[in-house]
Amino acid sequence: MKSIKLKMLLMILPLVIAAILVISLISGLLSDRAISGQTDQTAQQTLFAAGNTVNGDLEKIRSTAENISEMVSATYHNTDMDDYEMGLSRIIRDNPMILGSGLWFEKNVYMDNEYMGPYWYRDGDNIVKTMDYSNAEYDYFSQEYYTNAKALTSMGAVITDPYYDETSGMIMASCSAPIFDEHSNFIGCVTVDMELSSIEEVGAGIKMGKTGRAIMTTADGTYLYTDDKSKTESGANISEDENKSLAGAAKNILSNESGEVSFKESGKKIIAYYVTVPEVNWKLILRVDESQIREEVQKMVMTSLILCVVSIVVIAFLITLVVSRITKQLKVVSGFSGELAEGHYNIEEIKEKGKDELAVMSKALNNMYRSTRGIIENIADQSNEINDSANTLGAMSEELSAEFMHISENMSTVNDAMMSTGAATEEVSASVQNVNESVEQLAAETV
């Protein structure tokens, strides 16, 4: 029976192992695709959420600039600068992102002043007003924020490219909105200067796994946030990065709205996912070491292999258990058949369990056993009857033998008598012959 068990294990286990390995291979491939797809989706969702957060903060600044512009457009004819100061100071004080705000008028529009550019800014807990920029030396008419606003033909707000301010140690940007008169003529602009530390916090908060880190750039590729702060402080551009592979990938990033690129860094392959912040066209980039993605796949594959090994062990145990049960039943059937073959019909029947083939075989053997035993019992009963008849015939034979002995004795007596009679008959015959001879002699003499 051990050989049967071994044969069944050798037949079944390789098939099971092959099936499990194929399933594991397919599972690994599917897991690779699923994890890669999930990573892509997670990265894009993370970036879009961060982009919406950044855009939401910027939208607050844009809305503030537009609201101030509309207010000034409606009141600049008869509103004193002190009234504007009160309103702008309150706005600056209530919004931590706003560093300062200014009103910049075209020449001779506000109280016939050639240069009218009051600016209010945060100084600790105080809001300070300065007129230092209202002069030809500064020439705010040529500044980017002013030209951006003047280029607009309807109400809106434009945010300048951020820049790093060495004095404050902060990244800053200016949002400007045009001021129109009642005839929709451009008469100046409103600026709201903001510091982007909250946006840097958004960048710092973009993480994924152990290696996922964020990069934020302006539309032209100037670093706004990266883990290497020297790049933001120096105004470095990602498209001119010393890592040529990253610089090459940056060209695709800057020319597309969103997507995925890869580059090499220190011999490692890096996957970079990116999206564009609406309106300002800033780029949010999430870079992840490919090894991290592969690590998840490897963990999945390793887990699958461990499960495979455990499954093979469990299946081998179950197969052994089932085969042992089958071989045990076969042993019972074989032993029972052997007893029947040797003519032993005084044994117990096989216990029938279940409805499988072995149970059917056991039932058939039990039926054969009962049938043969019944035949043998009938034969035994008939043998007893035959034996009784034989005994009766024996007694009758003995009686007949005695009778035959008696007859034989009588026959001997008769035979003796017959012999005596024969002798007498011979004597009579001789006497008759003598008489005949005498008669013939007398007849002759008579003639």
Image (cartoon, rainbow, N blue to C red):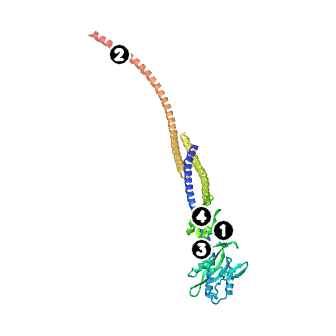
Residue at 56%, 87% in the rendered image: 183
Q: Secondary structure at mark 2?
A: helix
* Residue position marked by numbered label 1 in the rendering: 234
Q: Measure the alpha-carbon separation of dots 1 and 2.
A: 185 Å
Vertical order, 302 against 404 (above or below): below
Vertical order, 391 against 11 (above or below): above
Q: Secondary structure at mark 4?
A: helix
* Residue position marked by numbered label 3 in the rendering: 280
Image quadrant holding the N terminus, namely top right
Q: Measure the alpha-carbon separation of dots 1 and 4.
A: 17 Å
* Residue position marked by numbered label 2 in the rendering: 432
Quadrant of residue 292 in the image? bottom right
Image quadrant holding the C terminus, namely top left
Which mark identifies residue 247? 4
Q: Secondary structure at mark 3?
A: loop
Judge depth for marks 3 and 2 and give the one in front: 3
Residue 136 place in picture, x, y as percent: 65, 81
Judge depth for marks 4 and 3 and give the one in front: 4
Q: Measure the alpha-carbon separation of dots 1 and 3.
A: 21 Å
Residue 339 or residue 309, whichever sits in front: 309
